[in-house]
């Protein structure tokens, strides 16, 4: 049996920044909604800064908490700062995750990197 921190439970029960951005200029998708955790991340960038970050998530409580915490960490940062957000940063923001759930932290940082990459690809 494993236990979640208060931070994980708070982000799971009241996730922040859920939704989509109609005029997103970067989208990152990771996971497989057919058989497990899946995250769609939408970013809005102005003058090199993430002014909005929203997501849709399908997954366990840890995956939902990871997406919520990642969105809070990324929102308002420059693209360079957001690219520096790691799985460990997300886990720390949540006060830790049970070892069996650490793989969920990969969803957040990976989707963020993919959304930023999509942003730059669209600018070409």
Image (cartoon, rainbow, N blue to C red):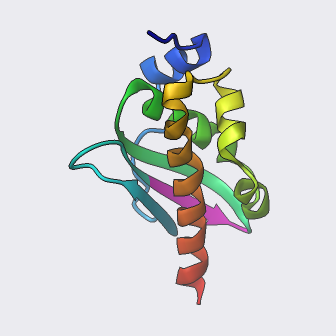
Q: Residue at x 65, y 23 (%)?
A: 96
Residue 22, picture quadrant: bottom left
Total marks drawn? 0
Q: Residue 47 location in percent, x, y?
A: 73, 68
Q: Which residues are magenta?
A: 41-47
- Pick whichever, 2 or 95, lies toward us: 2
Specify whether residue 104 is painted magenta: no
Q: Give above or below for 40 relative to 26.
A: above
The answer, for residue 65, to whether it is visible in the render is no
Q: Residue 123 location in percent, x, y?
A: 59, 84
Prevailing SS of the magenta stretch: strand
- Pick whichever, 69 or 25, lies toward us: 69
Q: Residue 34 location in percent, x, y?
A: 21, 49
In the image, taking residue 54 as reference, residue 31 lies left or right, namely left
* Image quadrant in which the C terminus is located: bottom right
The answer, for residue 47, to whether it is visible in the render is yes
Q: Residue at x 41, y 59 (%)?
A: 29
* Image quadrant in which the N terminus is located: top left
- Pick whichever, 78 or 36, lies toward us: 36
In the image, taking residue 78 as reference, residue 21 lies left or right, namely left
Q: Give above or below for 109 relative to 62.
A: below
Q: Residue 69 location in percent, x, y?
A: 59, 34
């Amino acid at each position: 049996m494993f236990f979640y921190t208060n931070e994980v439970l708070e982000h799971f029960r009241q996730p922040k920044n859920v939704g989509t951005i109609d005029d997103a200029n970067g989208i990152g998708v990771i996971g497989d909604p057919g058989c497990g955790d899946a995250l769609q991340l939408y970013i809005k960038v102005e003058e090199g800064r993430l002014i909005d970050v929203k997501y849709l998530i399908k997954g366990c409580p840890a995956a939902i908490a990871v997406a919520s915490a990642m969105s809070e960490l990324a929102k308002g940062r420059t693209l360079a700062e957001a690219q520096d957000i790691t799985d460990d940063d997300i886990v720390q923001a949540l006060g830790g995750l049970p070892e069996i759930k650490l793989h969920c932290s990969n969803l957040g940082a990976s989707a963020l990197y993919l959304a930023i990459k999509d942003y730059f690809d669209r600018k070409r």
